[in-house]
Image: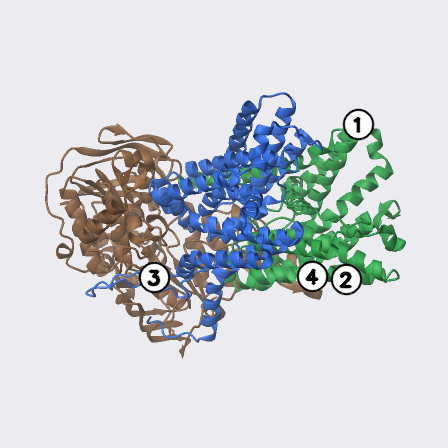
């Protein structure tokens, strides 16, 4: 547990991390400013104070937990949403965006996590789709187009064959193409959403060089990331958001990992996450040497009845993949999974369910619920055979099951026959939980149980998980929200790039050590030497 | 780093890409089939036989051009067979009542019929946003029915068609049939346009990722509408030439001809999911299917194998494409895994 | 099922806010506007009601065209015409609900007819030949299913291929021959109704099977799974539903039932030809879609399909009575097919047009 460096003083972490001093922060007027921007979605106050100042020639990090409002802020900058109040100024003049096209026209470009390139079209043409350079007779000038793109890539210090189809590119390369595309639109503000999440070490290095090239050419870069190590490597300024509002903004030289984390979290944890004590029982889940090439390697751990074990780590570390491999949605190349002593075959959700495993997936709308189906049907979806008498579903039993669980989980709905897309996010999540709890599993895997739901329902979900654990269920919880992890888990496993990097007991765990184990800037730095 | 010279490795890569191109593979298969059949039956390579081959392929080549554009956008046009028949009838009927009608006007009339049908298809697909499969299935029915009502059991008398028109069907210039030249010119023109003009490139984007295309500001509906109009117009045009070729009107039963066209297009390398493929490849696919058709006859294998072979070819082509796709994905994942584990 | 090119890029933001109570059953609105999925669902519930109207209208129309329309003898003819189509529509209904398609239904019928004729002409005892043909149906259906589920090929392209392939094999088997001379006891399928009724055997079998299918689809876990697969394949899989196995089963079932329809067809017409049933797939698809089964998957009822059978069969019967040619009737069938997909979606189109006229309001919904 812990490599060389984990016993350094936390206060020094800031200085240790930056391998190169950040460029001096320019003093000119800011390029793009958001002042106290707010945004409501129905009754949910997604953004109550969005404020940020982006300067040309500066890489600015936006940091905050999930649900802090970062993505809403980004979408407002990108012209996807219109703010309800507040001001946006560009070059000192007020800016009102009526759509993403307009944002692109004024020079704001967003590089999303999922690249949106056309797979069947070449790199060069992807950059210029819809506006390919022309020669006489409105004919496309292919050599000119290729040359321009090559030139842009050169400016970024990257070499790619511009005639390859986008389909053949890695995510990292596609990212670079997106950046090139932004530059070709003369973008002055480039927003990057979790750019390093899916990248290898070498690719991250290359991206940092590209970002530095962008900065040197005068662009304002907004770098949204959970990886504080990367933030310290490449950014000059950091803005922290929490619960939909601006918390603080400062030059990187004045900050440390600790101070940032404290600003991100900054609340009294114990009152929100009432994990009560209990004696864990027999071992329910045992995972041995689980491996999937390129995704995770040699993962071994166990979960006992009544325990909540949290699997934490950065996005892209492989946590959801491990969970899906245990349940059988994804394949695995090696390793053994045992539940209550019985080995589960790979790639068979049916077998896992029969062994008593329940799986609440990460994406509740796409994977957890059938949105167009009724609430009660959704709750019953995993229990259909149990509700049947001689192959016919007993409607009364189904209704009773759904009603019982709706009461138990304090579900708020119109009628049980309404379709699931009439529910709010929190209630949708409760419905997914109800579906699996209805099977009375001995192992419950939950992937991001409270992502994107309001605090009130969050607390309810946590109380529920606690109750469930108390009844003897083993719970494996994947979470990116540190307070949740610290508040709920009996043990914390930290996954880093596919391997278990650390394990903490409830007493040992704290935000800093988890973050440290998850990001391990020090290991990267060591590898580079 | 601005000078880029083509190194030996570079030209080798270009050569490999060329050979791997679908079009080249089909050409090779065509030649193999042709060669094998000629060995078995020498008269297969006779000028007359080759001419018959080219003539037979011409109409399907033209239909394949229009269908390719539709399929590239992730749609399908199943009504082209019926449009062909209707247009052939209309042109024939025009000649029957006006024996001195200018040939070009007649062809224009046929094209107009097809154009109108294409507009109807395109409008329903793009305005009401209904899957093109169902729409064109429906219009296939409707058009064929209308055709049947209009024809009402009458036959087009070959003698009522001016001989100059019929000659179009089989006359040659320097040994190459006129109709094949027309088809080839169409293929070349459309193929060139697909490589050269922005709106044509938009079609690939639309088929590759419809959502991203909308985000990129591409006027998808307008483009798709146009592909249906063009497909219909070409089918109308081909209908007029069909009349010239066969001097008779046939109402093709069921999903006959259009499916062979789809098979030709897919075999020719146009992905059924859209986003990729060339008009040239589709045309070669049409030639291949026709060559196999004629080869069966020449090899004295019963022509009854023709349809089964077309179906088997289509399935093999799709399965093969899918296999290549999966292999490439796996290779990519392995490559990425190697990089991650550095 | 590959749909037309126009997708919707919707964005929904979820966020956590301290202190606010959970809002009661309010959906988070998307910024693209228009909850089209919901409209389609509601419109489909109304579709079955509309179908009842269509059935009545058809009956009235038929009566107005000919006094002969509501006679028993005409009902028998009605059964002869629509029976095979109806039979093939049942498994296709389930397949379309899961979001796939099977265009090879009529070719399987033709192949079954050819094989039956061939075996009979080569001296096989009919019961054995019938079994062999049913086995063939299982095989052809399984081939479709394997290509779609194991190889992951798009079902539209696959079944276009097998449509051609199976018809082609039928052609190879029988070529231009017509096999006749089946024993009278079998031929009565085409000449006599089920005793004490005017139902053709095919139609009678359809009615029985329709009840079975309705029970399975609307009351069993398998049926519920079929709907789930059509609405959200991923969630279905994540919930332990064996998506691939079910789809494979449905294709095999389709092959089996189409082969059965082919056998009945052969006896109904007392002859076997390779081009039996050519073009019928279009009628079958029309019946299914007009019956309210959504082409996008996940919605529909067997009752709707039964009513569609009545409407389409009834219209065709009426038109035949007034001597409209079969080909001319195709116009009507084609129009019905187009209506059946345009109408449910027109609601979404109207919403969109309306949204474009009304300027965007502030984002508070």
Q: CA distance from mark 2 to mark 4?
A: 10 Å
Task: Give me the chain that's blue.
Answer: C
**According to the image, label 3 marks what residue?**
C13
Chain letter of the residue carrying label 1 = B
Q: CA distance from mark 3 to mark 2?
A: 55 Å
**According to the image, label 2 marks what residue?**
B109
Can the viewer see residue B72?
no
Instruction: Tell me the mark number nearer the camera, choosing from 1 and 4.
Output: 4
**According to the image, label 4 marks what residue?**
B115
The secondary structure type at the circle numbered 1 is helix
Q: Which one is earlier in the sequence, the residue at label 1 or at label 4?
A: 1
Same chain for marks 2 and 4? yes
Same chain for marks 3 and 1? no
**According to the image, label 1 marks what residue?**
B39
Chain letter of the residue carrying label 2 = B
Task: Give me the chain that's brown.
Answer: A
Res A470 → quadrant: top left
């Amino acid at each position: 547990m812990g490599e060389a460096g984990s016993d350094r003083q936390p206060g020094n972490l800031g200085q240790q991390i930056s391998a190169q001093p950040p460029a001096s922060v320019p003093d000119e007027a800011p390029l793009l400013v958001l002042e106290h921007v707010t945004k409501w979605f129905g009754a949910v106050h997604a953004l109550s104070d969005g404020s940020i100042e982006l300067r040309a020639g500066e890489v600015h990090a936006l940091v905050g937990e999930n649900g802090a409002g970062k993505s809403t802020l980004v979408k407002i900058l990108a012209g996807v949403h219109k703010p309800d109040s507040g001001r946006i100024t560009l070059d000192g003049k007020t800016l009102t965006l009526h759509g993403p096209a307009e944002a692109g026209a004024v020079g704001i470009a967003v590089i999303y996590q999922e690249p949106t390139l056309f797979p069947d079209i070449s790199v060069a043409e992807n950059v210029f789709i819809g506006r390919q350079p022309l020669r006489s007779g409105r004919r496309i000038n292919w050599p000119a187009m290729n040359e321009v793109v090559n030139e842009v890539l050169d400016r970024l210090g990257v070499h790619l064959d511009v005639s390859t189809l986008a389909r053949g590119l890695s995510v990292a390369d596609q990212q670079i193409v997106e950046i090139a595309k932004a530059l070709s639109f003369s973008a002055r503000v480039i927003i990057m959403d979790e750019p390093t999440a899916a990248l290898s070490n070498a690719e991250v290095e290359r991206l940092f060089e590209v970002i530095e090239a962008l900065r040197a050419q005068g662009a304002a870069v907004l770098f949204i990331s959970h990886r504080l190590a990367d933030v310290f490597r490449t950014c000059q300024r950091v803005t922290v958001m929490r619960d939909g509002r601006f918390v603080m903004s400062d030059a990187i030289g004045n900050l440390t990992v600790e101070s940032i984390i404290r600003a991100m979290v900054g609340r009294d944890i114990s009152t929100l996450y009432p994990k009560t004590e209990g004696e864990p029982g027999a071992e329910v889940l045992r995972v041995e040497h689980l491996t999937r090439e390129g995704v995770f390697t040699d993962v071994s751990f166990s979960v006992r009845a009544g325990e909540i074990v949290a699997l934490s780590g950065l996005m892209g570390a492989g946590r959801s993949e491990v969970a899906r491999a245990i349940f059988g949605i994804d394949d695995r190349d090696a390793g053994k999974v045992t539940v209550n002593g019985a080995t589960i075959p790979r790639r068979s959700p049916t077998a896992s369910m029969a062994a008593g495993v329940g799986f609440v997936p990460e994406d509740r709308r796409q994977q957890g619920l059938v949105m167009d189906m009724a609430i009660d049907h959704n709750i019953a979806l995993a229990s259909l055979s149990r509700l049947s008498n001689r192959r016919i579903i007993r409607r009364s039993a189904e209704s009773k099951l759904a009603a019982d669980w709706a009461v138990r989980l304090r579900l708020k709905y119109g009628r049980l026959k309404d379709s699931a897309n009439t529910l709010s996010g929190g209630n949708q999540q409760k419905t997914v939980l109800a579906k699996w709890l209805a099977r009375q599993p001995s192992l419950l895997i939950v992937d991001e149980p409270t992502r994107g739901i309001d605090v009130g329902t969050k607390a309810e979900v946590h109380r529920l998980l606690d109750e469930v654990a108390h009844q003897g269920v083993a719970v494996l919880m994947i979470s990116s929200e540190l307070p949740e992890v610290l508040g709920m888990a009996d043990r914390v496993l930290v996954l880093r790039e596919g391997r278990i990097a650390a394990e903490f007991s409830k007493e040992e765990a704290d935000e800093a050590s988890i973050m440290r184990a998850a990001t391990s800037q020090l290991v990267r730095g060591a590898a580079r030497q | 780093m601005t000078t880029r010279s083509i190194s030996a490795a570079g030209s080798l890569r270009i050569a490999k890409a060329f050979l791997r191109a679908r079009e080249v593979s089909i050409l090779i298969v065509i030649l193999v089939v042709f060669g094998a059949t000629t060995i078995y039956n020498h008269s297969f390579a006779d000028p007359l036989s080759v001419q018959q081959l080219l003539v037979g392929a011409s109409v399907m080549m033209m239909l394949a051009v229009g269908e390719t554009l539709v399929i590239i956008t992730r749609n399908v046009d199943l009504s082209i067979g019926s449009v062909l028949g209707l247009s052939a009838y209309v042109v024939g009927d025009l000649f029957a009542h006006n024996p001195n009608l200018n040939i070009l006007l007649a062809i224009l009339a046929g094209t107009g019929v097809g154009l109108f049908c294409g507009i109807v298809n395109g409008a329903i697909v793009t305005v009401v946003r209904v899957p093109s499969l169902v729409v064109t299935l429906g219009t296939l029915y409707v058009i064929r029915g209308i055709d049947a009502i209009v024809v009402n059991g009458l036959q087009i008398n070959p003698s009522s068609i001016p001989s100059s028109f019929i000659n179009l069907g089989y006359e040659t210039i320097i040994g190459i049939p006129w109709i094949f030249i027309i088809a080839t010119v169409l293929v070349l023109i459309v193929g060139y346009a697909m490589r050269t003009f922005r709106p044509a490139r938009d079609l690939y984007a639309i088929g590759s990722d419809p959502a991203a295309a909308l985000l990129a500001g591409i006027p998808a509906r307008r483009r798709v509408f146009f592909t249906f109009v063009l497909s219909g117009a070409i089918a109308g045009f081909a209908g007029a030439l069909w009349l010239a070729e066969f001097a008779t009107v046939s109402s093709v039963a069921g999903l006959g001809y259009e499916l062979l066209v789809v098979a030709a297009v897919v075999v020719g390398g146009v992905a059924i999911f859209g986003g990729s493929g060339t008009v040239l490849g589709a045309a070669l696919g049409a030639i291949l299917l026709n060559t196999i058709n004629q080869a069966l006859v020449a090899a004295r294998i019963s022509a009854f194998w023709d349809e089964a072979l077309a179906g088997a070819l289509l399935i093999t082509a799709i399965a093969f494409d899918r296999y290549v796709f999966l292999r490439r994905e796996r290779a990519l994942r392995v490559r990425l895994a190697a990089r991650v584990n550095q | 099922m590959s749909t037309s090119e126009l997708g919707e890029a919707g964005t929904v933001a979820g966020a956590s806010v301290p202190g606010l109570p959970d809002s009661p059953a309010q959906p988070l609105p998307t910024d693209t506007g228009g909850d089209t999925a919901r409209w389609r669902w509601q419109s489909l519930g109304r579709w079955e009601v509309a179908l009842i109207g269509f059935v009545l209208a058809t009956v009235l129309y038929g009566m107005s065209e000919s006094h002969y329309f509501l006679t028993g003898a005409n009902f028998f003819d009605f059964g002869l015409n629509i029976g095979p189509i109806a039979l093939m529509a049942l498994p296709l209904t389930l397949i379309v609900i899961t979001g796939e398609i099977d265009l090879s239904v009529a070719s399987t019928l033709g192949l079954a007819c050819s094989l039956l004729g061939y075996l009979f002409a080569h001296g096989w005892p009919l019961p054995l030949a019938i079994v062999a043909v049913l086995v063939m149906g299982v095989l052809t259906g399984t081939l479709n299913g394997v290509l779609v589920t194991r190889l992951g090929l798009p079902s539209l392209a696959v079944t276009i291929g097998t449509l051609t392939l199976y018809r082609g094999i039928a052609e190879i088997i029988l070529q231009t021959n017509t096999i006749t001379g089946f024993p009278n006891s079998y031929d009565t399928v085409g000449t006599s109704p089920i005793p004490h009724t005017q139902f053709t055997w095919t139609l009678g079998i359809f009615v029985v099977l329709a009840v079975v299918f309705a029970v399975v689809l609307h009351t069993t876990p398998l049926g519920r799974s079929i709907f789930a697969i059509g609405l959200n394949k991923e969630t279905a899989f994540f919930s332990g539903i064996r998506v691939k196995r079910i789809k494979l089963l449905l294709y095999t079932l389709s092959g089996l039932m189409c082969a059965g329809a082919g056998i009945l067809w052969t006896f109904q017409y007392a002859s076997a030809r390779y081009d039996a049933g050519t073009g019928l797939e279009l009628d079958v698809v029309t019946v299914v879609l007009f019956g309210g089964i959504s082409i996008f998957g996940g919605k529909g009822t067997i009752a709707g399909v039964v009513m569609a059978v009545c409407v389409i069969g009834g219209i065709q019967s009426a038109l035949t009575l007034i001597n409209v040619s079969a080909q001319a009737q195709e116009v009507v069938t084609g129009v019905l097919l187009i209506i059946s997909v345009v109408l449910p979606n027109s609601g979404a189109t109207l919403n969109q047009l309306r949204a474009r006229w009304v300027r965007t309001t502030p984002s508070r919904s």
